[in-house]
Amino acid sequence: MAKRSPFDSTQVMRRTEDLIRAASNRYRITVQVANRAQRRRFEDFENYEDPKMKPVLRAIIEMSDELTQPEIIGE
């Protein structure tokens, strides 16, 4: 049985496109997503949590939320 993401693929694609459109440089936003995913992967590994979502997808979701809802970042 295949694992299912809590987000459907169309929503992830839309969020990815929003990130790319908002970025001034596609390469830079790609590297930022990769770096955040790598950090998250190591954090999850250290905490011995079973990830329900792949780190790259989680990074895209988090970064798009920060883009659309700046109030969640705080001060």
Image (spheres, rainbow, N blue to C red):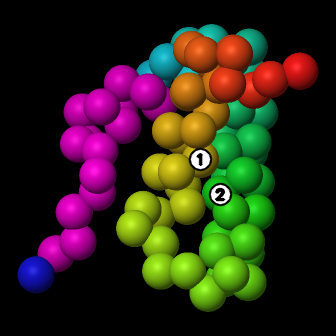
Instruction: Give the residues drawn in magenta, as a range.
Output: 2-16
- In the rendered structure, the answer to whether residue 66 lies left or right of residue 4 reads right
Asked whether 61 falls inside the magenta stretch, the response is no
Specify which label sits upstream in the sequence, 2 or 1.
Answer: 2
Asked whether 12 falls inside the magenta stretch, the response is yes
Residue 3 coordinates in the image, percent (x, y):
23, 71
Of helix, strand and loop, which one carries label 2?
helix
**Residue at x-position 47% and y-position 30%:** 16
- Is residue 74 visible in the rendered structure shown here? yes
Q: Along the line of sight, which residue is nearer the eye, 50 or 19?
A: 50
Residue 6 coordinates in the image, percent (x, y):
29, 52
Residue most extreme to the right: 75
Q: Along the line of sight, which residue is nearer the eye, 72 or 61?
A: 72
**Residue at x-position 49% and y-position 18%:** 18
Residue 22 coordinates in the image, percent (x, y):
63, 12
**For residue 59, which numbered disc appears in the image?**
1
Give me the C-alpha separation between circle 2 and circle 1: 5 Å
- In the rendered structure, the answer to whether residue 75 lies left or right of residue 40 reads right
